[in-house]
Amino acid sequence: MSELALETAQAIADATLRAGREKGFKPLSVVVYDARGAVKVLLSEDGTSLKRAEIAMGKAYGALAVGLGSRALHKMAVDRPHFIAGVTHATGNLLVPVPGGVLIKDSQGNTLGAVGVSGDTSDNDEIAATAGIEAAGLIFDTGA
């Protein structure tokens, strides 16, 4: 398994926040997990509300745990709510099934980790996350 280096995770987080600022999004929290589920980077901009970091963590951790971007988990929450309830329990309540949890992949399709963003609309959170991953030269998977 390829590893997500701290330097790369930091670059993703920085580029994610920069994209949010450039697009005029509300203040964001961003988390980057590696493939084993360890937090590599967690940043919250000034002005984020109290639980934004935890919401970002739930988006990313849930995506990583299920192997699907959180956009797919959102659809599952609508179509298969009992499954999502079970996965939420299995992950220790670390699943937030809305867009903004994005898998990080390498050019061979290996999952390196996940990014979670919270602070603006879920769609805008996802836009910021994908921009951060692309800026690091990696591939994103939103679950779309």
Image (cartoon, helix red, strand yellow):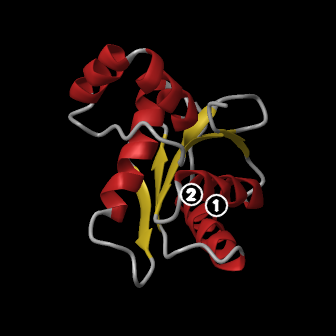
- Residue 109: % across, % down: 71, 28
Occupied quadrant, residue 48? bottom left
User: Toward the viewer: 24 or 39?
Assistant: 24
Residue at point 41%, 54% (across, down): 56
Reading the image, the residue beneath label 1 is: 128
Residue at point 62%, 65% (across, down): 16
Left or right of 38, for residue 6: right
Occupied quadrant, residue 31? bottom left
Q: Is residue 135 above or below residue 130?
A: below
- Residue 64: % across, % down: 46, 34
Quadrant housing the C terminus: top right
Occupied quadrant, residue 62? top left
Reading the image, the residue beneath label 2 is: 125
- Residue 57: % across, % down: 37, 51
Q: Is any atom of residue 139 visible in this view?
A: yes
Left or right of 142, for residue 32: left
Three-letter residue code for mark 2: Asp
Q: How far apart are marks 2 and 1 (CA)?
A: 5 Å
User: Toward the viewer: 5 or 70?
Assistant: 70
- Residue 38: % across, % down: 37, 46
Residue at point 75%, 61% (across, down): 135
Q: Say few, some or many: other residues with alpha carbon within 10 Å of mark 2 (under 14 / 14 to 19 / 20 or more).
A: many
Q: In this view, does 44 lie above or below 141?
A: below
Label pair 2/1, CB-CB below 8 angstroms? yes
